[in-house]
Image: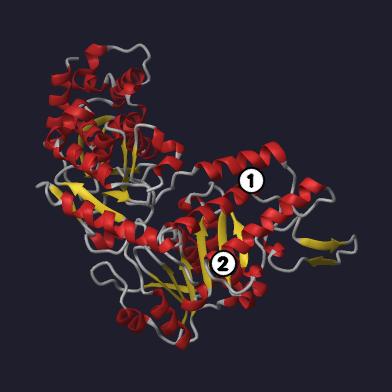
Amino acid sequence: MNREDFPMLKNDLIYFDNGATTLKPQCVINEITNYYENYSANAHRGDYDISRKVDELYEKTRDDVKEFINANKREEIIFTKGTTESMNMIIFGFMKNYLQKDDEVLITKTEHASNVLPWYTLEKEIGIKVKFIPLEDYEVTIDNVKKSINNKTKVISLAWVTNTIGDLRPIKEITKVAHDNNILMVVDGAQSVPHFKTDVLDTDIDFLAFSAHKMLGPTGVGVLYGKKDYLEQMLPLNYGGGMNSFFESDKSLEYKPLPYRLEAGTMNISGILGFRKALSYLNKIGMDKITNYEHELKDYLVKRLREIDNIEVYNENTKSGIVLFNIKNIFSEDTSQFLNHYHVCVRAGNHCAKMVKDELIIKNTCRISLYFYNTKEEIDKFINIMKGNKDIFKVII
Amino acid sequence: MDSNLRREIIVDNYQNPTNKKTIDDKEFITASTISDSCIDNITLFVKFKDNVIEDIYFDGEACAITTSATSIMIKKLIGKTIDEAEELMNNYYNMIDEKEYSEEELGELNAYNEIYKQPNRKKCAIFPFETLKKAIEKYKMHN
């Protein structure tokens, strides 16, 4: 749906790599250009009209994000560079002081690097223990969460939807278990927020991280959501302009209140204003409609892939627009090169979640990640190309 | 090189690679490379004696280009001195980088003489050689 709004789709291209980044609608591109052409000033600085306009739009975006994920307060929305930076702020700005030696953090082996490496680093720095919730059929079950908890467990940190298997975790139920045991719940929303309605109040999660560019917005913009009490305790990772109220030569100083204390330096203003347009665009279509359509597309894709004898699909039943597959006995990168020849963009590899190989047996796969502008016609074209995969070496060599 | 012959060489070496198995023997020096794009991953097991490459095995998961280039490299370099191997490598890199090179010396490695047309696959063609360089360096450090 809405394909006419995406300039990239005018190219001869089947774009199936939306888990990596999404295409941008014209309204987002126009807004970025509009900022640079008509009111290119800094935010929170201005005593003149165009700067005030930037302020207004910047803060309006914060309100829109708050609405989009149903947060309580606008101070709970912090702009960042992306999910990775948001996760690092949660882990090094908050958890580093909140956690003590021997406290335990639960993650899984299918997490993205940005929900693994900061924890590993903190383990080395302050002696926490990172442990893995065992998976069943690649998925997190409430039972296994309960079994993994002990009196040292202080944090559970999970992707809402993984970028590899595409499995949807029961975050609300896990959060309930966590809170019953005085455990904080951190959620990586990079692959979930773009695809279904997010409600931080209803789920009661403590922190959420996500990226604008995976939901039609510009690159270099992300969001950190945290409950206000926790954000109040979070130390900035960056100090400088925009986040202080005053500082003197006698070293006295005062930082600004939330959210500004955590947004030092000039932010990606054009990106944040563009993100506002992306949010209103998604709202206009409706998140529920997007979710349902993506599930319909995935079911159709899986059904059609079954028509081809030598294709293996690894995650038929997961509830997302992600499909992992291989051509039997063909290395995933060779398959992606084969598809690239026909201008079909898919990802090959282990998708930045290198421990997946422990769970999935197959190390490397091709990944299709769908979005609402993909169509059944594109899937049909893709299937026709895949039916010719016997000639793969004629095409790629 | 004729494109059918090229394909035949590459596919044959990919599907029936030379010396593909893990070696657990202290006489062999091990060197690994994992590609930046986090896909290809090979380990070489190289036995040197008096500056001669006596034997090479490899293991890992990699694409058709990397696997076949590793297989051909192994066939070409077993029995060569380190100096000879380095000379052959220079020659091969010159071909990959579209510089002047001697076609005669490269034999089956000429199958990659048009890899420059697919810039994102160049890294696959030099992958085994980058790994071998590490093994040679390790050998030189200890001898």
Q: Is residue B120 left or right of residue A342?
A: right
Q: Position of residue A216 (x, y in %)?
A: 48, 49
Indicate the chain on which mark 1 is placed.
Answer: A
Q: Is residue B23 visible?
A: no
- Mark 1 to mark 2 CA distance (whole Å): 21 Å
Residue under circle 1? A270
Q: Is residue A217 visible?
A: yes
Q: Which mark is residue A67?
A: 2
Q: Earlier in the sequence, mark 1 or mark 2?
A: 2
Q: Position of residue A252 (x, y in %)?
A: 86, 67
Looking at the image, is B84 positioned above or below residue A343? Answer: above
**The quarter of the displayed image where residue B28 is located:** top left
Kindly check if marks 1 and 2 are in contact, taking CB atoms under 8 A apart as contact.
no
Q: Quadrant of the C terminus of chain A?
A: top left
The three-letter code of the residue at mark 1 reads: Ser
Looking at the image, is A115 positioned above or below residue A378? Answer: below
Identify the residue shown where x is 34% and y is 67%.
A168
Q: Residues within 10 Å of mark 1 (few under 14, many from 20)?
A: many
Q: Position of residue A78 (x, y in %)?
A: 62, 62
Please name whichever residue, B40 or B131, is drawn nearer the observer in this view of the structure: B40
